[in-house]
């Protein structure tokens, strides 16, 4: 069953995001859906925007770590983008290091980590 | 801005109870804690720490304790410090070895085993009262700096 979160595809990269009111069932469904798509569509990279997540507790941390680990086994690199500073501070105090989860400040930096380059700016027509 | 009841230090602030019986109660509990922390004037970082601590405790009560009750209260100490107090109670199996349960890496459930030990680090006061076969109550306070 779908978690109801949009998952966009750009070439062999999937882009999605988690919402602030992430409940446990949705998180697990999303993991299943994303994993299935990585395998079925030959995905090489996943960008997960977490800028809307107001907290990451040990459950969500485990979901992110499992997602990254499963993706890696299937040949896809997952980058988590946009963690809020307050969430980062709280996570490290909790003792959670998100082992194996690659992070980026924002989605654009995540794209660059996955090898995507911004096209050269087109010269303005004069 | 402080809620009205805080302007009178002599007055007891009654705790508000929230059920932790179903999965959607976990979200509702988080919302209630966030709203209270915002109303009490906690910074965004403190709000995040308190809500994260609450999330760990209510999930523990739901998963390990078979459900329970969360009580939120705005408290103040003798020096006039304002804090947010939470108590999460369940009537589950209790915890046989509290020291072990507080250690990082210990988990019998879905988390990472940082739940209790990590929660303690996020707050200023942490007490746990557990009796095997009778249940567990965890009470925490975070004071406003």
Image: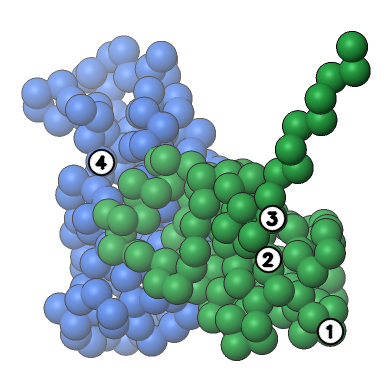
Q: Which residue is mark 4?
A: B142
Q: Residue at x 41, y 62 (%)?
A: B56
Q: Quadrant of residue A34?
A: bottom right
Task: Quote the CA–CA distance across marks 1 and 2.
Answer: 14 Å
Residue under label 3: A116
Whole-percent x and y of residue A4? 83, 61
Q: Secondary structure beneath disc 1?
A: helix
| Residues indicated by labels 1 and 2 sit on the same polypeptide chain | yes
Which residue is at a point 42% across and 40% down the rendered structure image?
A: A85
Q: Do marks 3 and 1 share a subunit?
A: yes
Q: CA distance from mark 3 to mark 1?
A: 22 Å
Q: How many angstroms separate mark 3 from mark 2 (CA)?
A: 12 Å
Disc 1 to disc 4, C-alpha distance? 47 Å
Q: Quick one: quadrant of the N terminus of chain B?
A: top left
Q: Residue at x 61, y 72 (%)?
A: A77
Residue bearing the label numbered 2:
A46
Q: Colour of chain B?
A: blue
The tag on residue B75 is none
Kindly identify which residue carries mark 1.
Answer: A40
Label 1 close to label 4 by CB (< 8 Å): no
Task: Return the residue nearer the eye: B62 or B116.
Answer: B116
Binning the other alpha carbons within 10 Å of mark 1 as few (below 14), some (14 to 19) or many (20 upward) gives: few
């Amino acid at each position: 069953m779908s978690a109801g979160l949009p998952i966009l595809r750009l070439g062999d990269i999937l882009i999605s995001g988690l919402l602030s009111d992430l409940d446990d069932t949705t998180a697990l469904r999303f993991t299943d859906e994303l994993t299935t798509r990585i395998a079925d569509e030959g995905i090489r990279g996943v960008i997960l925007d977490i800028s809307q997540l107001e907290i990451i507790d040990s459950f969500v941390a485990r979901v992110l770590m499992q997602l990254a680990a499963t993706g890696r086994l299937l040949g896809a690199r997952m980058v988590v983008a946009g963690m809020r500073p307050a969430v980062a501070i709280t996570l490290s105090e909790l003792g959670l290091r998100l082992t194996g989860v690659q992070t980026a400040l924002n989605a654009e930096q995540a794209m660059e980590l996955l090898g995507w380059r911004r096209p050269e700016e087109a010269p303005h027509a004069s | 801005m402080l809620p009205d009841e805080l302007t009178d230090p002599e007055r007891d602030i009654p705790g508000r109870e929230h059920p932790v019986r179903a999965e959607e109660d976990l979200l509702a509990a988080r919302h209630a804690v966030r709203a209270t922390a915002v109303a009490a004037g906690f910074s965004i970082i403190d709000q995040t720490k308190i809500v994260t601590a609450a999330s760990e405790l209510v999930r523990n009560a739901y998963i390990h304790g078979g459900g329970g009750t969360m009580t939120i209260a705005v408290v103040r100490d003798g020096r006039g410090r304002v804090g947010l107090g939470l108590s999460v109670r369940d009537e589950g199996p209790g915890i046989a070895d509290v020291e072990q349960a507080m250690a990082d890496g210990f988990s019998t459930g879905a988390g990472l085993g940082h739940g209790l030990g990590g929660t303690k680090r996020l707050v200023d006061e942490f007490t746990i009262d557990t009796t095997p076969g009778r249940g567990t109550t965890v009470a925490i306070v975070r004071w406003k700096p």
